[in-house]
Image: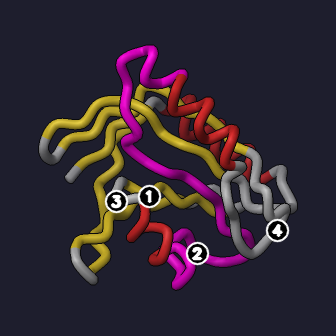
Amino acid sequence: MMMVIRGEDLKRIIKAAENSRIEVCGMLFGRGSGERIEVEEVRFIPNRLNSAEGFEMEPLEMVKAIDDAEAMGLQVVGIFHSHLKCPPRPSGRDLKGMNLWPVVWLIVDDMGNYGAYVLEGDKIREVKVKIV
C-alpha cells in the first residue's frame, strides 16, 4: 500500500508538531483505490485532551471537516497525529483508534520523522509514503 501526499502538506504537519507542546492531530481527505491512497486535503482538528501523551479530535470539528470534504467529493483516507519525545510508531492507544478508524494513520514526531501505518486484523502494516 502507498499513500501519496504533497510535500508542503507533510511539512505543515511536521512543523506543527515541532512547534507544539501537545500532540497535534487531524484528518487526511482524498481518494483511494486499492493499494494507492492520494491525499488531497489536510485538516487540522483541535486535540481536546490538550495532552502531550495522547489525542482525541474535537468531535464537532471532525464532523465539520468530514462534511466539507464530502462536499468536495473527498473521503477520509487517513488520520494524522504527532508523538512528542518518542518514535512515530503506533502506540497501544493508537491501536485502539486504528480499530475504530480503519484508514491510514500518519504519525510524525517533533524531530521531523514520520511513518504511515494500517491495521490489518491484529497486525500493523507500514504504508509507503510517496511525497509529490
Q: Position of residue 50 (x, y in %)?
A: 84, 61
Q: Is label 4 in contact with label 2 (beta carbons under 8 Å)?
A: no
Name the kind of residue labelled 1 in the image. Trp
The residue lying at 35 percent from left, 49 percent from top is 129
| Residue picked out by circle 3 | 102
Q: Earlier in the sequence, mark 1 or mark 2?
A: 2
| Residue picked out by circle 4 | 51
Label 2 and label 3: CA atoms lie apart by 21 Å
Front position among marks 1 and 2 = 1
Q: Secondary structure at mark 4?
A: loop
Q: Position of residue 62 (x, y in %)?
A: 61, 41
The residue lying at 20 percent from left, 53 percent from top is 1
Q: Earlier in the sequence, mark 4 or mark 3?
A: 4
Say which quarter of the image contains residue 104: bottom left
Q: Is label 1 in contact with label 2 (beta carbons under 8 Å)?
A: no
Front position among marks 4 and 3 = 3
Q: Secondary structure at mark 1?
A: strand
Q: Earlier in the sequence, mark 4 or mark 2?
A: 4
Front position among marks 3 and 1 = 3
Say which quarter of the image contains residue 9: top right
| Residue picked out by circle 1 | 105
